Each structure stands twice: as C-alpha cells, then as structure tokens.
Image: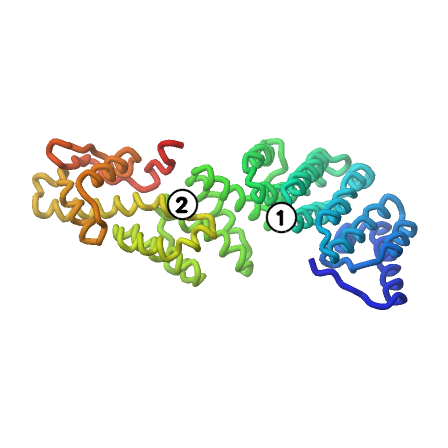
Amino acid sequence: FFLAVVGGRGLRCSVTMAYVKKVRGAVTRQDGHQLASLLDLKQIQATKQQEENNVLHKTPQPYNEIVSAHLRCGRLLFQKKYDAAYTEVSSCVPVFLEQVFRTEEETWVVPPLLMIVTNVRRVAFASGSTSTLESAGNVLMSCFAAANRPQGDPDKRLATLRIVNELFRIYFKLNTLRNCKYLIRVVEAKKFVAFHLFQAGERVTYKFFVGRLDVFDENFVDADEHLTYAFNHCHSKATKNRRLILKYLVPVKILVGKLPSEKLLNSFEDLHGMYANVKEAVKTGSIKLFEKTLEDHMEDYVGAGTYLLIEKLRFAVYRRLLKKVQLIYAEFRPERAVQVPLTYFVKALKWQGYDTDLAEVECIVANMIYRKYVKGYISHKNGVVVLSKKQPFPPLNSGMLVDPDT
C-alpha cells in the first residue's frame, strides 16, 4: 500500500475537506467510479484520528461510516498495524451492503462495492494470518450473495465474477481449494449471468484460476481449454499476466500432446529456459535431456507450482524412446516388428546414461501400457513387449494422465 503523507496541519485539513467534498459530489451525482477511486486504499492519504472524526460528522450517512472506516484503515496500514486495519475495512461491508447496495437500485453502486471487496482482500493479504484470511473469505461471500441476488437493476449482478476471483485468490492462499467448487458451480449454472457479459479481464482471471484448479485435480484436458481461453483473451500488453498463464499452460499443452511453437516459447526468455528442453525431450525421447532439465530448473518448477506436472511428462519421454526403438528394430526384423525385445529398450536407456536393468524396464513398459501410452502386452517369458498392430502408440491426450492411486 502506498499511502500519501501530507505534512502541515493547515494543508492536511484542507486536503481532508477537499476529500469530503469529492465524496459528497460523487454520491450526489451517483458517480460510482469516482467514489470507488476515493475508497482506493492506494490513493487514500494518511490522516489523524481527529480528521477522521471530522469526516465522520461532515459526510452524509451512511457514507460517513464507510469513508471514515477506510481512512482509519489507511492510517493503520501506514503504521503497519495490519490486523487492526483489516478490522476497520471489513467493518464497513455490512453497512455498505445493507444501506447502499441493497437500497440503491441503479448500477452505480457496483464500482464502490468492488473496490471495497478488493480492499478487504488486499488488507487480509497484508495481515497474512489464517484467521484474517478466513474472515475475509466469509466477508466476501456475503458480498457475493448480495450481488448475485440484487434488488433493482439486474445488471448489478455483473459484480459477481470480480468477487468470485477475489475469493479464488483467498482460497488459493489458504490452500482450501475445495471452496472454489461451489463458486464454479454457481458461475457455470444456466441461470447465472451470461459469461460474455463480464469484462474481459474478469473472464481471463476466472479462467486462469479454474485452469489452475483443473491442474490440481489432474483434469488436464479441461485445464488446457481454460488456460488457453485465458491466454487468448488476455490483453497483448499484459506481459506479466500472459507469462503467468503460460507457466501453467505450456506444460499442460505438452502433457496432452500439443507441443508449443518455438515462437511462443521465445516470446518469454524465462519460459524458453524452463520448457524448451522439456519439449525437445518429449519430441525426441531423450530421457537424459529430460533429467538434466528437471535438475537444472527444479527451483523454477517448484516456485511456479508445476514440478509435479513436469514430472508426469516422464512417461511421454519413455513412450517416444520406445517408439524410436521399435522403428529401428522393425528395420532389422520386419517380420517381428511388433515384438520388441526389452533388452533393446534397456540398451537405449543406458546409451543415454540412464542406469537401469531389465526388471525396471519391465515396470516402465507395464506402466506405459496401463496408462494407455502404449497398446500391447509384455511377454515375460520371451522378454519382449508385444505391440498392437493397430496404433501401438496412441495420441498422448488419450493416455491416463491421472496417477492410478488417485
């Protein structure tokens, strides 16, 4: 939070009175965007308690309670008293919902509601305590309920998706992702507001979080759909957001068999370093390159939350290597092209510096068959994998992407 500090009592008093005048003007004109700007904690100037009391007495009800609570919150943030600041900012939510949002029938009350919602979430994050974050989740759920069933203009429901996104941020911070499922069911219900009516930025944020949740639940095909939507609809100049989306989208694309283009990877240097060699390993079957990349960028993957996702690509690399072994073997023994000796696969892995033996290779191939990366069966007696004559290596997106024990 960047709170302006204005020195000198006379100047501070005049600034405070100017602030009150702007609040009155915004309410009188029903200018929701200006009122939202005046409630933005990044813009509110640090005040003294006496000045806050003056605002309380010189601003019309119920806005006096709402504005003075924000001023107190700003002062406490400046003092780094984050829990006390949260108490102040959250205290005005019931007042705004009951005496403003539910009584005013026009949509001008939507922007200030969304600013209050954002303020509550930001201050809760500044506090960082679990109890404060949980409280913020409950407070924002009350805002969502009010916005989802508004009185007056039904377009007031357009506040809902922004509130959902702020709730997602809280639930991801708390790691209580199960709470997201209810919100997704509501948003995707037929009676909910048509998705295309929401602002593009809100739609992108929603799809990004839903895609991340799909990754967590190992619904990778759905994750690809949602993250692709987020990336395609993200503003071309929103570089930071596009990079963030790609950190999840690129490994998901590879996992479902859609290798990203070099142009896409080259658009962000850090992404190229993280994923270009992973793509190459999957494409060529180089377990050596895969292992090295995993080791070199482990901290990056862990930091991005994609390490386990990258690890799942190991079987895609094995699959490609086995396919290359089968093609080479078929050139020498075309009459037995679908009966590949497992010792050949052992040699291919050892040639890449992967220390293994026949027993481990049998387990690897058995897992690939079980996960439907490969069609066939193992003849333990003959030491071969007997591949299906029809499409022995199905598309990657037809494989079992979820671990068997989940």
Front residue (pair 320, 179): 179
Mark yes or no: residue 30 visible. Answer: yes
Q: Position of residue 48 (x, y in %)?
A: 84, 57
Q: Where is residue 101 in the image (x, y as percent from the top left)?
A: 78, 40
Label 2 vs 1, first from the N-terminus:
1
Label 2 close to label 1 by CB (< 8 Å): no
Q: Which residue is drawn at 79% across and 42% down?
A: 96
Report the colour scheme: rainbow
From where the camera sits, is residue 391 visible? Answer: no
Q: Which quarter of the figure is the N terminus placed in?
A: bottom right
Q: Quadrant of the C terminus?
A: top left
Q: Would residue 90 appear left or right of 273 to someone viewing this image?
A: right
> Does residue 389 lie above or below 263 as drawn?
above
Q: Residue 155 carries which label?
A: none
Residue occupying image coordinates x 14% and y 38%: 338
For the residues labelled 2 and 1, the Cα–Cα distance comes to 31 Å
Judge depth for marks 2 and 1 and give the one in front.
2
**Residue of label 2:** 309
Q: Where is residue 127 in the image (x, y as percent from the top left)?
A: 67, 49
Question: Amino acid under label 1?
Answer: Gln
Q: Is residue 256 left or right of residue 63?
A: left
Quick one: SS at disc 2?
helix
Q: Is residue 239 or residue 289 the one in the foreground?
A: 289
Instruction: Tell me: 319 left or right of 229.
Output: left
At 23% from the left edge and 48% from the top edge, which residue is drawn? 321
What's the residue at 45%, 49% (across, down)?
248
- Residue at mark 1: 199
Q: Is mark 1 on a helix, strand or loop?
A: loop
Is 238 in front, or is 43? Answer: 43
